[in-house]
Image (cartoon, rainbow, N blue to C red):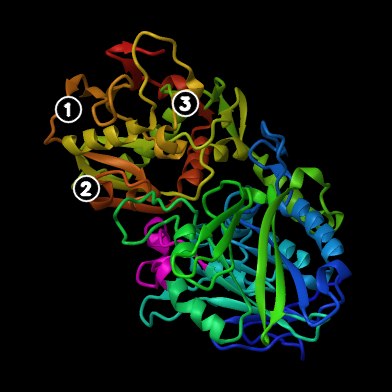
Amino acid sequence: MGLDRRAFLGRSAAAGAGVALAGGAVSGEAAAAAPAERTGRPGRERRYAFTVMGTTDLHGNVFNWDYFTDREFDDKARNDVGLAKISTLVKRVRRERGRRNTLLIDAGDTIQGTQLSYYYAKVDPITARRGPVHPMAQAMNAIGYDAAALGNHEFNYGIPVLRKFEEQCDFPLLGANALDAKSLRPAFAPYSMHRLRTPCGRDVRVAVLGLTNPGIAIWDKANVAGRMVFPGLEEQAAKWVPRLRSMGADVVFVSAHSGSSGTSSYGDQLPYVENAAALVARQVPGIDAILVGHAHTEIPEYRVANEETGREVVLSEPLKWGQRLTLFDVDLVWSRGRWTVEKVAAEVLNSNTVEEDPAIVRLLGDEHRKVVAYVNQVIGTSTAAMSTVDAPWKDEPIIDLINHVQAETVKAALAGGEFAALPVLSQASCFSRTARIPAGQVTIKDAAGLYPFENTLEARVLTGAQLKDYLEFSARYYVRTPAGGPVDTAKLTNADGIPDYNYDAVSGVTYEVDVAKPAGERIAKLSFEGQPVDPAARFVLAVNNYRASGGGAFPHVAAAQQVWSNSEEIRNTIIQWVQAKGTVDPGAFASVGWRLTREGVPVF
């Protein structure tokens, strides 16, 4: 397809395509005449309308394909995923609105999440000499993105991979609050400026300010500590929005990898709010609309009144993985020598209403086939089938497998050292309720499906009292359920919106979780080797780096002494363990270490 490339950060700028502005990316193109109903009225009053399309949390999804199951993606709502579907929607909108009256932006979390993105970060890495171009860069370039904010998962593979991806993109990666740790200057372009040519003879300048998540400092501490810092979204927006207005921006969009709820998953470890998009709208004047990301929720349109001006800011978050495309329709009127935003409206389009764009399918068909072959490699056999269907409320062998591998790995690493005599416990979460290990042949996709995140393994020392606090905090996940009546598992978990990945099952000890009691009073019969756990006893906890860095705000672990860490992803450790053993036998590691009770009576 014919592409209109944007010039940014000193890259080839065609005359008339845009005007370079200090400190940010520049993008724009001469606009063809838009449909009459969107551009003009007779008389003095000049009007113009344009559309900003948005995606977020694509997480490596190009095709409507689930590499962990090796079949077409499907869920209960019959959603579809991937940029190939988004491309079809984008083309349709451009035909309807006029290609030159649209912009396309993203709100981050692009290069992590599927085996496709993993393959080109680790197996055939884009950072290699003469390495490939990342499939997400290829797809987004072909579709014609104008800008994308950085997400926190952009940093999972390290800064070199991110910088190479940035180099491969024909659009800027924006992060006004991703700063160099030493100079405190932006480490990425803070904004992009786009010029839309109107039939009225008066160009419209649209600024896109990119904001990322301050939680990066915790979640990817190993990759960014001492190199980058991530101040709060509100303070950086307050710094940049007035600048963009003074540079002549008629319209200011924010692309924020930050949810709208005003909450944080890391407690008070940083003085910044994780999900701050609505706070930005409320506290920073001069913003017209915000493309929201990070929270993986669908918000077609959400209006927030700015506290200073009273003007409404329109927020929209399209559903993750390319399941939805947000449309912001912006109406402007020329008045007193300037363009003024008269109205902004937002909606989302569902990608399950269209077919995949054949151009994207052709473009990345070879990459897709390589990854399908990779994930179907057989690495061992299993003597029994295991699944996570009941893992959120039962101690299941498939979660025991993760804990067994982690504990065994840490014990081997500590052998012969100062901490070798301490008991090793392990934490694991149910990341997916559809993960499974089949009886018979086990492939890479089976093992990888247990651990879809790029977490690495650490070992931290906790006391028995701290372990009890940790388990109490984890047990908040359950909805308080009185004794005596039936238990509906559909209503038992995710209390107060706590996600599955923030419930930890700990192996190496035994305990009960009494869901009839209030949160904070649920852990009973906490024992080690048949004896009650001594509050002063010391244990080594095998824990993923997300949790060890404060993710989920679990108590004690982030401040606990680290006695070992590993750069190998837990997913790969599991794969290597299966390859080394050859056979996975649940009888060798599965046990019921914890159970749910109500007033001492087992729920199941």
Residue 302 seen: yes
Q: Where residue 216 appears, x then y in whole percent? A: 42, 60
Question: Based on the displayed image, in which of its 4 quarters is residue 525 positioned?
Answer: top left
What residue sits 82% from the left and 65% below the top? 97
- N-term-proximal mark, 3 vs 2: 3
Residue 134 seen: no
* Label ID, residue 533: 1
Q: Residue furthest left?
A: 536
Closer to the eye: label 2 or 1: 1
Question: Few, some or many C-alpha atoms within 10 Å of disc 1 (few <14, some 14-19, many ≥20)?
Answer: many
> Mark 2 sits on what residue?
417
> SS at mark 2?
loop
> SS at mark 3?
loop
Do the numbered discs 3 and 2 sit on residues whose CB atoms are within 8 Å?
Answer: no
* Label ID, residue 391: 3
**Quarter of the figure that contains the N terminus:** bottom right
Q: Where residue 175 appears, x then y in whole percent? A: 51, 71
- Say whether residue 347 is left or right of residue 408: right
Q: Where residue 483 appears, x then y in whole percent? A: 34, 12
Please report the bounds of the magenta region as a residue range.
211-235
Q: Nearer the viewer, residue 203 or 434?
A: 203
Of the residues shown, which amino acid type is indicated by label 1? Val
Q: CA distance from mark 2 to mark 1?
A: 24 Å
Question: Based on the displayed image, in which of its 4 quarters is residue 139 positioned?
Answer: bottom right
> SS at mark 1?
loop
- Say whether residue 437 is left or right of residue 236: right
- N-term-proximal mark, 2 vs 1: 2
Q: CA distance from mark 3 to mark 2?
A: 35 Å
